[in-house]
Image: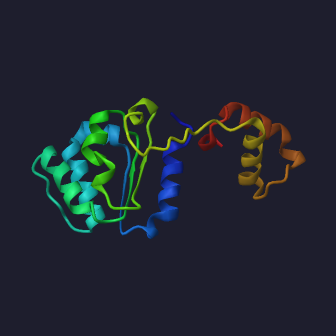
Amino acid sequence: GGVGKTALASAAYMEVSHQFEARCLLENIREESSKHGLKKLQEKILSVALKTTVVVDSEIEGRSMIKRRLHHKRVLVVLDDVDDLEQLEALAGSHDWFGEGSRIIITTRDKHLLSSRAHTNIYEVSLLSHYEAIKLFNRHTCHKDKHVEDYEILAEEVVSYAGGLPLAL
């Protein structure tokens, strides 16, 4: 963890969500499902995507409701921090649950969860190279891409400490 999967997925959501008929960003699924259960997350997907309060009586009903109410809509759903196949099956069981042109973005630390899913493109977020890290640090401290001599030692120390993690910079 810590390479910026959530930040990247959230940024993508913010950038393109207006292009979809229905949309929902579900963060911290690992934590939320253990605290409140998958039924509550199903209610949230439906309520946010349909812009109305939806009550789900059971997880099985929730699966059916998601498919029935969203299969004709072009939707964007972000499922953040998925750590169990059951979560995927309950929240986005199959590509046919959603209308043509829909996109489901899943962040996970375990890419093997995605191997059984059809129509899946996997993008692995990697650490920044030393050069990329220095450039990012300078952009945020100097508001430009150019390297500033006075900050060279500080930049090297910060980048070394951050270990290539974009969010640490």
For image coordinates 33% across by 61% down, the residue present is 99
Residue 128 image position (x, y, % from top left): 68, 38
Corner quadrant of residue 46? bottom left
Name the side, left or right, on which 51 lies relative to 133.
Answer: left
Quadrant occupied by the C terminus = top right
Residue 30 image position (x, y, % from top left): 34, 37
Residue that extends furthest to the left in the rendered view of this protein? 57
Residue 110 can be seen in this image:
no
For image coordinates 23% across by 51% down, the residue present is 42
Name the side, left or right, on which 120 lies relative to 159.
Answer: left
Number of numbered callouts drawn: 0
Residue 123 image position (x, y, % from top left): 54, 42
Name the side, left or right, on which 119 lies relative to 152.
Answer: left
Residue in front for this viewpoint, 92 or 165:
92
For image coordinates 31% across by 57% down, the residue present is 98
Residue 124 image position (x, y, % from top left): 55, 38
For image coordinates 59% across by 43% down, the residue present is 167
Against 22, is 162 above or below? above
Residue 150 can be seen in this image:
yes
Corner quadrant of residue 23? bottom left
Corner quadrant of residue 163? top right
Residue that extends furthest to the right in the rendered view of this protein? 149
Name the side, left or right, on which 8 lies relative to 26.
Answer: right
